[in-house]
Amino acid sequence: MDGSAMRRTWLVLAAGLLMSGTTSSLHAQDVGLPIGAVPDPVQLEDLDGNAVDLAAITAGKPTLIEFWATWCPLCAALEPRITAAKREHGDALEVVIVAVGVNQTPRSIRRHITRHAQPGRVLFDARGRATRAFMAPTTSYIVALDAQGRVVYTGVGEHQDIAGAARKALGR
């Protein structure tokens, strides 16, 4: 490996280390859509390839949306807290898992969720529409919407206050 390639390798590694530390230390409201914003409507797909209007699912209902991947360890760390929030609030809180279209397919997602149940409806963002509309910077990005569809919380990483985000969505 020549000197230039070695420098590039070290820069990539250093950037990765910085990003991993930064991502896990970000707090709510540091990323993504601003509080009070109403996300643009987007079409996603269910795991059978059928079009699903995300706004129709969230309309009039407090909602937690997680941008998720089968390969995301931060998402796995968040899952018990999202499950607990769903269990606590039941049908009053909608939970939507947006499976990003990076290194996964509906088939691989189906296989994964048969072994690791998810706390909400899983939709596939094959074309990145939701990722763009919600300004999702990474997986483990959580957006809480109130009943009017306004953003009341955003956060990223495994140390988010999911119970607090759910309460904000519910107006409590």
Image: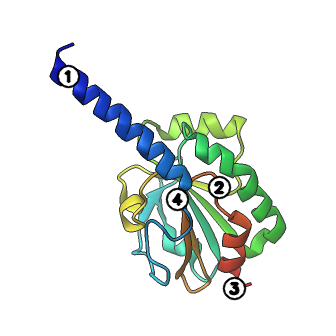
Q: Which residue is mark 3?
A: 171
Mark identifier at residue 159:
2
- How far across and down, in percent of the image, does residue 69 sit? 53, 44
Query: Which mark sits nearer the N-terminus, 1 or 4?
Result: 1
Task: For marks 4 and 3, give the CA distance.
Answer: 24 Å
Q: Is residue 170 left or right of residue 32?
A: right
Query: Which mark sits nearer the N-terminus, 4 or 3?
Result: 4
Query: Which mark sits nearer the N-terminus, 2 or 1?
Result: 1
Label pair 1/4, CB-CB below 8 angstroms: no
Q: Amino acid at mark 4?
A: Leu
Q: Determine the secondary structure under disc 1.
A: helix
Q: Which residue is mark 4?
A: 26
Q: How many marks?
A: 4
- How far across and down, in percent of the image, does residue 54 sit? 50, 68
Vertical relation: 143 (above or below) 44: below
- Which is more foreground, mark 3 or mark 1? 1
Image quadrant where one finds the N terminus = top left
Task: For marks 3 and 2, give the CA distance.
Answer: 22 Å
Q: Determine the secondary structure under disc 3.
A: loop
- Which is more foreground, mark 4 or mark 3? 4
Q: Is residue 99 visible?
A: no
Task: For marks 1 and 4, give the CA distance.
Answer: 31 Å
Query: Dot 2, how many residues are within 10 Å of its Cα: few (below 14), some (14-19), or many (20+)?
Result: some
Q: Which residue is mark 1?
A: 5
